[in-house]
Amino acid sequence: MGTVKSLSNLTLIMVILVMSAGCDTAEDQRTPLDIAGAVSNKIIGDAQFDFDLVPQEPVLGMQVIDFARNMGSVPGKTAFALSFILSENDTTIRLAIGSSGPMSAMVNDAPEIIHNGNDPALPVETSYNRFDFKRIEAVTLKRGENRILIRSQAKVVFLRAVTAEGDWEKRFKFSLTPAGIDSAHSPWLMIGPFDDYRMLDALRKKFTPIILADNKEYTWFLPKQNMLMELAIDKNTTYQRESYLEWHYATGALLWSMLKLPDTRYADFVKQVCDFTGKNLYYFRWQYEQLYALRGSYHRIFRRTMLDDAGAPTLPYAELMMRSGESGSDPIVTPMAAYVRYGQQRLEDGTFCRPEPVPETVWADDLFMSVPFLLQLGELESDPAYLEDAALQIENFYALLYDPDAKLVYHGWYNRSGKHAPVHWGRANGWMIWAVSEALQKIPPDHPAYNKILYNYRNHVEGLTACQDKSGMWHQVLDHPGSYEETSCTAMFTLAIARGIRNGWLDRSYTEVVDRAWQALKKNIDQDGTVHGICRGTGIGDDLEFYFNRQTFDHDPRGLGAVITAAVEVSGLHTDQAGE
């Protein structure tokens, strides 16, 4: 009996193994284009061409005191706003101040800070969450409640507590609680407008619910709460952080990648998204500029102060222009082209850089945020200057970021200190090698920079191949196997290496690298097209822990474009080899 029981158990185990093998075999039978279609179909199914009406809330610690919207535009008259700054200790705060006209700020009993502003209607966001204020004042605070009174003839006043680097100083809170009032949408009370500018004295001495002036009674009121139109995201979709219609570098790469698929349904969807953006452009410009919706839908298209806002998001729009044979000015492509060519910050030698985390930082990511778009513009405008700029960026980025020992690139270069950010982040390497593979397809082989670009590409591929995990994946930090396996960089390396084999930049021995990578990627893609293991957006960190601990999201657009393009390149590679 014991023998029979053992045989039965063995048989059961064998059946389970066979069934499991059958499932794996079925999954392995999905072709690359099957998978690309499933991923794209899920995007289409999750995308909503609709809006939600939502209350506007304060964001990024920016205090927006909009006198014009709450009181009407009354030239020459004076209005006031009151709040309290809460502090845990006796300390000093850096208070950034901007206004469209004359104003002053009074904190406790300190002297009045007078600002005769003629500042931009909205502070310029020079880098993520950092704004360009023309005036920053050191203000002394006591522990607890600190009364702040604004006197203004300006239409709008902006205040923000900032660190020395310009980031939001979150230790200090603006609040109305000391006045016995709680408001979710604004920590300010307003009163006015008055004919008499000298009302300051009466208001500064004490809080009075009713003010008698100009033969009238004035009472304090809470500012109006604006309602914003926001792109709708169904609560049942896998990815919730941004709409797939949003103007975003990852969405741009995603839509552009869908245009590479042979089925015209996907091109129709991309055109629908681009048309939808153009149709609603006017309203969202008004919402950004007049309601100061700093994080409202499409805010990046109007912010336009970094390559993330301009280059990669425009790729599908420019691609559709090229396919249609259109030329001339375009309300979306033209201003983005002007920004990349003339507006983006550069080093003295022309290399693109950012003012974060410190001034003159070169980000590896920015090679993809710029080069593919520059190549498109060169074709659209028949202007070789764009191609020259693309070649310059590639040469300079490798000169600054390439690590010859590891044959990988660092995430960043701090130009002023002459030092690298110390980590070989996976997706940063992915953005660069993807961008270079685009350039090698567009830059003629007889171009003076071509051989150097090809040399850098081949060296980079050698470094990437050396740190591919035995699973076929690459890691979040490429040369640290203790970091997690990451999907977006694996897809980027797969597409760039497969493309290299197809174009003869690499020999056929690299096919094994591509096949192992693709088989590993497939395991992270469900039957319904959901892609797992994509690292969230990531700034430049100064230690391994920062990268090791970055969260991943399912079906994050930051990896979807690369997965689709990798599928197209792998499919083409196998088709090419089968036809020989």
Image (tube, grey):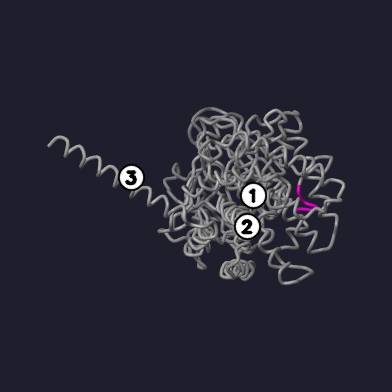
Q: Residue at x 58, y 35 (%)?
A: 109
State which tag comes first along the sequence, 3 or 2.
Answer: 3
Of residues 150 and 27, the one nearer the viewer is: 27
Query: Where residue 445 appears, x then y in whole percent?
Result: 83, 51
Residue 328 position (above or below residue 102): below
Q: Quadrant of the C terminus?
A: bottom right
Residue under numbered circle 2 = 572
Q: Secondary structure at mark 1?
A: helix
> Alpha-carbon neighbours of circle 3 within 10 Å: few (<14), some, or many (≥20)?
few
Return the mark for residue 498: 1
Q: Quadrant of the N terminus?
A: top left
Q: Are marks 2 and 1 in contact (CB under 8 Å)?
A: yes
Q: Which mark is residue 17?
A: 3
Secondary structure character of the magenta stretch overall:
helix
Residue 345 in sight in this render:
yes
Q: Tag 1 or tag 3, which sits nearer the N-term?
A: 3
Give SS at disc 3. helix
Q: Give the image location of residue 139, x and y in percent.
A: 62, 34
**Which range is magenta?**
340-344
